[in-house]
């Protein structure tokens, strides 16, 4: 009787171990999209693309222009 109980306990422990290993190996821990967006924003720097048009009183990269446009990306 003791051998049978010991065998059942060993089988249950092995099955539990296999189930834990299977669960841990299939779950992937990834970064959420917000984290990727933050990394991209930090990598892009603070400079933005300015477009300068005409001749006037507005400073644009050290030049006096009539109009200056800066684009914003909202992907």
Image (cartoon, rainbow, N blue to C red):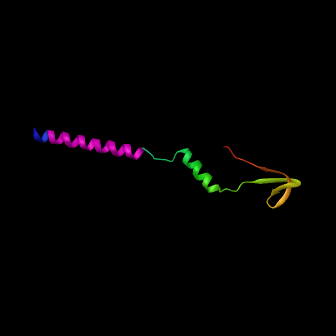
Residue 70 horizontal/vertical position (percent): 76, 50
Q: How many marks?
A: 0
In magenta, the rendered stretch is 5-26
Of residues 2 and 52, the one drawn nearer to the viewer in this rendering: 52
Picture layout, residue 4 above or below residue 56: above
Q: Quadrant of residue 18?
A: top left
Instruction: Look at 42% across and 44% down and name the residue there.
Output: 26
Any magenta on residue 8? Answer: yes
Tell me: 34 left or right of 4: right
Residue 69 horizontal/vertical position (percent): 79, 49
Instruction: Residue lying at the far right in this picture: please name it.
Output: 55
Instruction: Look at 71% across and 47% down and name the residue there.
Output: 72
Of residues 2 and 69, the one drawn nearer to the viewer in this rendering: 69
Residue 42 horizontal/vertical position (percent): 60, 55
Instruction: Residue lying at the far left in this picture: please name it.
Output: 1
Q: Quadrant of residue 58?
A: bottom right
Tell me: 2 left or right of 18: left
Instruction: Look at 49% across and 47% down and name the residue there.
Output: 30
Tell me: 59 left or right of 20: right
Any magenta on residue 24? Answer: yes
Tell me: 14 left or right of 67: left
Quadrant (top left, top right, bottom left, bottom right) of the N terminus: top left
Instruction: Look at 67% across and 56% down and name the residue there.
Output: 46
Quadrant (top left, top right, bottom left, bottom right) of the C terminus: top right
Instruction: Residue lying at the far bottom in this picture: please name it.
Output: 62
Of residues 6 and 53, the one drawn nearer to the viewer in this rendering: 53
Residue 55 horizontal/vertical position (percent): 89, 55
Q: Main secondary structure of the magenta part?
A: helix
Of residues 54 and 32, the one drawn nearer to the viewer in this rendering: 54
């Amino acid at each position: 009787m003791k051998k049978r109980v010991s065998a059942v306990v060993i089988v249950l422990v092995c099955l539990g171990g296999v189930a834990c290993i299977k669960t841990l190996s299939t779950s992937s821990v990834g970064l959420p999209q917000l984290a990727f967006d933050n990394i991209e924003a930090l990598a892009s720097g603070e400079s933005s693309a300015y477009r300068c048009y005409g001749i006037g009183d507005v400073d644009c990269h050290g030049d006096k222009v009539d109009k200056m446009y800066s684009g914003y990306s909202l992907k």
